[in-house]
Image (cartoon, helix red, strand yellow):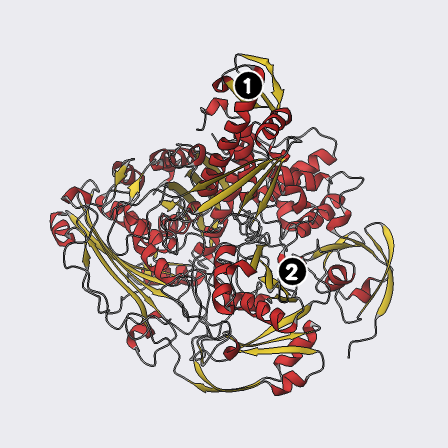
Amino acid sequence: MAGARDSLRVVGKALRKVDATAKVVGATKFADDVALPRMLYAKLLRSPHPHARILRIDTSRAVALAGVKAVLTGKDLPIPFGILPVSQDEHALALDKVRFVGDPVAAVAAGSEETATAALELIDVTYEALRPVTDAADAVAHPEPRIHDYGDGGNLHKLIDLEFGDVAEGFAEADLVREDLLFFEGSTHLPMEQHAAVADWSPPPDGKLTLWSSTQTPHYVHRALAKVLELSPAKIRVIATPNGGGFGGKSDPFSHEIVVAKLAMLTGRPVKITLTREEVFYCHRGRHPTLMWVKTGVKKDGAITAMHFKSLLDGGGYGSYGVASTYYTGALQTVTYHVPRYKFQGARAFTNKPPCGPKRGHGTPQPRFALEVHIDKIAEQLGMDPAELRLKHLVPPNSLTANWLRIGSMGLGPCIHKVVEGSGWKEKFRKLPPGKGIGLACSSYITGAGLAIYWNPMPHSGVQLKCDRGGGVTVFCGSTEIGQGSDSILAMIVAEVLGVDPFDIAIVTGDTDLTPVDLGSYSSRVTLMTGNAAIQAAERARDIIASHAARKLALPAERLAFAERRVFDVENPARGLTFAEAVQLAEAAEGTVGTVGSYTPPPSPGRYRGAGVGPSPAYSYSACVAEVDVDPATGIVRVPRIFIAHDVGRSINAATVMGQIEGSVYMGLGEALMEEMAYRGNRNVVHKIPSLLEYKSPTTLEMCDVVTYVVEDPDPNGPFGAKECGQGPLLPVPPAVANAVYDAVGVRIDEVPITPEKVFKALRRKAKGEAARYGPTAFPDIVWPEPTRVPPPWEGGDGKAAEGSGGRAKTVKVPV
Amino acid sequence: MPDAKAKIALELNGEPVEVAFAPHKTLLEVLREDLALTGTKHGCELGECGTCAVLVDGRPVLSCLVLGLACAGHRVKTVEGMAEGGRLHPLQDAFAELGAAQCGYCTPAFLLAAEALLAANRRPTRDEIKQALAGNLCRCTGYIKIYEAVELAAARMRGERAVPSEESLYGRR
């Protein structure tokens, strides 16, 4: 497979992305740039109520408006959908109930956006208001009226109780047991591109639908369209246009995609929709607001004896990825520092707000924030340097965790050393003048999920490869370019194996007609999974080409090297053929030179219910040191500089890795200091700030300097050793900032964002001699199900739950 | 009833152009819908994000807040007008080289805002670059590669043989 590092010619270099030129000249076609002749424009009527029954919808006045071509309501699209098989709880247009302000109720297609907008005003909807559920605690307190008639009881969507060893025993062995309560506010992806989609219908006998959409997951959109429209998947083509930013916000199949498809089928004309910025806030699927309680026992040297973690997620009005998100708030606590006994209880509530889902780091930044702040406090109580405490208890490489996750390469130690040395940590920690502080935190993230959303034995990623007799190569893959550079990764990997230039390679991606399935651009899976599939396809092509070149050159195939667009004798490089000549020989002998490759993650050792979330082919690691300046008069926190070290396994494109790390730090900084999905506190549950002006995100004036260290510890499961880098480096930033604020002014801000108001209030409390803290004070009483007990590996378990454990919560009813 | 179209003449990317459009349209809509110049993007159409910035008489303006009619007789430059003679503008080249365009959606506006900055200031400091680009939001890059690309392009436009630093491409060793 992959050669030694020194022999790599393409992999690891800092190269331009293959789509960089198109992007800087404005030629990249995003979804809203697609325009077809005779195209109509669609608009959605959205609910003004957070929770209401729909009693009657009268569309007659809208239908009568000149220029209106079609009007849809829920009864036109009655089949439910959703990203997870266990949460098929959405309708393209609300059937009988609305569940948040912004829930789509009706749709119009007209000759212009203006006419479609005018028609929305003419749709009369009679609602009967229901009591809205405003947040997770409210959902726990008010099981009725229910938002959905399925789930784990009342307004609780999902309840999880997992136990890996006896935590009570572990707490009894500890020298110190500490409990903390923390809260992570919800935030949204805020991609610069609003979601857009264009549908085109070719009438029978073709009966074929084409949808262009700014989606990260064309495969799942394909499935949802087939289900809701009752079309054969063979009659649907989904083209994922390059996404103008995704961050997880374009990973669900959406109402607007299904609606334009249906409108195109009804009108026989292409139909486009481009959401307004306000509507993007209603699509949401962002970070779940999460309340967390953590209790950890440690020995005097900081060794953890047991950990018990509880999370309560505010899920919003629909399921989305929420069941997976809930598991993720408990899955990765064990992969950084050794936790011998671990218990996790997680709950997700339905509330009458836009649905939450996967945002960069999917369900793991919240618990990571809690854990890293908690450990900072433990280190202080033990009188240990928090960097030393962490370094002493790292999870070893090639090991299993208490919850049966298999760790491969593990570069956290070198990451901590890099940021500690680079930042001058030892000279600064607890030694800076008042108002200046420094804080450290670490993290880990998955490189793709070990199991697909729909469990099946098929590969997670496929690549087809075609060699042209002119020396060009075309790579076909279902992966979706969302700015992370996935097209370039394919080109660089294939170029490495075949010895051609990355810019000789044409990349065809994200098109369900043309490309083999890749599950999508989420969970940091693309580089590892498409990369491995691309290596397999390219090596198969190389073998075919080599066999014919070897015959021509009268050499054994093993003596051939592929480089510099040539195929040549490694012992006598002058003796060889051009790559094009070699392809021609192969094509003459065997016909068209085409190959396929695919990738399936290794099986996970965990075999208990819930073991599907957390396993990954490889885990990335990050360490972060944040410097802060806190103004005690105003509570304003400024972050001048962040040091970040990330274990990426191996860079495929060094420049892209840098960009992903810096971008992750940026987004983590936004969540640490300012980003929040806020709702009016009254009963209306109206989004306070659905605009780019009022939803605060860092501009050039707030963004900090970033010192980046790339740690390369190749993982055997990664293509050329590569692991993820697009999400993990976000995770340690919020806790590092919180820990730095404490170092600066001695107050604990146990929730993000760390706004001036919170810092100011905590400073006032400190001045009055009260607890020098701002954060949550209680975790609601939840009736947890009987725990699933899984003995950890060192207690002789086999990855299965103990006989008879793991009662399911009552009243589980999944709609068809 | 659709409005009767209005017709204006302007200089667009260095060439005289006449265009007819519904008179309520913004410059953004005229560029994208009536002139098929879709390189100019939009993020809010409310003047909040800077994504739709173009140059009018050399100054960056938010094309979502300017009526098309107001541009009659003016010089408008979009991202499509930056590369000349089949060669990338030094800013475009530096953005591509450093990965300053990730998703690429905010890129056209950043390029034009940076071009206006460099036209007024051949040697901007990092702080001056931050100030000049503070009205443009980017969610991918954390702005760092954008600053570095502007600095690299500025150096090259001054005739220096500048190359990206090792640290910016590979991180600190």
Vertical relation: A632 (above or below) A489: below
Query: Based on the displayed image, in which of its 4 quarters is residue A503 positioned?
Result: top right
Going by the picture, which residue comes out furthest to the top? Answer: A572
Residue located beneath label 1 in the image: A551
Provide residue A509's location: percent of width, then percent of height: 57, 47
Q: Secondary structure at mark 2?
A: helix
Mark 2 belongs to chain: A
For the N terminus of chain B, the image quarter is bottom right
Query: Based on the displayed image, in which of its 4 quarters is residue B163 positioned?
Result: top right
Mark 1 belongs to chain: A
Provide residue A136's location: percent of width, then percent of height: 34, 70
Graded by Cα atoms within 10 Å as few (under 14), some (14 to 19) or many (20 or more), the crowding at tag 1 reads few
Residue located beneath label 2 in the image: A32
Vertical relation: A611 (above or below) A412: below
Query: Based on the displayed image, in which of its 4 quarters is residue B83 positioned?
Result: top right
Q: Is residue B93 left or right of residue A404?
A: right
Q: Is residue A174 visible?
A: yes
Q: Is residue A485 visible?
A: no
Amino acid bearing label 2: Asp
Q: Secondary structure at mark 1?
A: helix
Provide residue A782's location: percent of width, then percent of height: 24, 69
Q: Nearer the viewer, residue A220 or A401?
A: A220
Camera-nearest label, 2 or 1:
1
Q: Are marks 2 and 1 on the same chain?
A: yes
